[in-house]
Amino acid sequence: QQQVKQSPQSLIVQKGGISIINCAYENTAFDYFPWYQQFPGKGPALLIAIRPDVSEKKEGRFTISFNKSAKQFSLHIMDSQPGDSATYFCAASRISSGSARQLTFGSGTQLTVLP
Amino acid sequence: DSGVTQTPKHLITATGQRVTLRCSPRSGDLSVYWYQQSLDQGLQFLIQYYNGEERAKGNILERFSAQQFPDLHSELNLSSLELGDSALYFCASSLLAGSTDTQYFGPGTRLTVL
């Protein structure tokens, strides 16, 4: 019930194209869904996040679409650029015992944007 | 630069040994998290501390332990090391423990167990 399933494992997109990464979860206690971007040799960095009371959130070229009933959410990268080439992780968060908030990460998607 | 520092950057050791990884959170952040990233297990939450106290435990082995000191830096101790412990270990920090504050990740420590 703690798992977050992410697909695809890898994605190759042409410059200017749309990159779409999908995630699904089971635990309805999750109430916060961030996406992290990780470049080689670096730690993950927060890209964009959404709460389940919103169906879509857009920040620049990055959009999260959220389907609460299907327990699925996705990241769309519009006008993909070579600089977007990185590994993307979806995550889900909930309050656990001790009033702590844990992140459960998906398995990651390695995005390559071809020039 | 996230403001979270981790030392050392690389660590090579032998099976059965013990190592200590160090993390300094962003200025003002009270919560520290440890994660393990490996090829087969992905990014896994290990443990969280808030203002010196343990707040949550994830998939942390009994051979591993952590603590957060009064100056809020944290150390992750790994003992009786096995080959399978080779991984990237990340520390992250956030302002509070239970809010949706952003977790800022450090650059990681790459541990290689030979």
Image (cartoon, coloured by chain):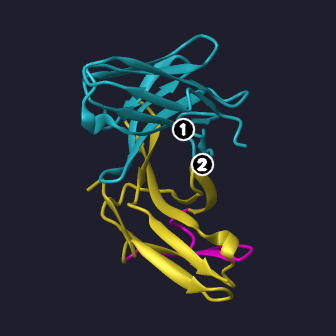
Q: Which residue is mark 2?
A: A42
Disc 1 element? loop
For the view shown, which residue lies furthest in the top direction?
Answer: B70
Q: Are marks 2 and 1 on the same chain?
A: no
Whole-percent x, y for residue A113 in the image: 60, 79
Whole-percent x, y for residue A108 in the image: 43, 63
For the record, the magenta segment spans: A51-69
**Along the line of sight, the residue nearer the viewer: B59 or A51:** B59
Question: The N terminus of chain A appears in which quarter of the rendering?
Answer: bottom left
Q: Is residue A4 above or below residue A74?
A: above
Q: Which chain is yellow?
A: A
**Cβ–Cβ under 8 Å for marks 2 and 1:** yes
User: Mark 1 belongs to which subunit?
Assistant: B
Whole-percent x, y for residue B54 in the image: 43, 22
Q: Residue at position x 26%, y 25% from top?
A: B15
Q: CA distance from mark 2 to mark 1?
A: 7 Å
The colour with which the image depicts chain B is cyan
Q: Which residue is mark 1?
A: B108
Whole-percent x, y for residue A86 in the image: 57, 65
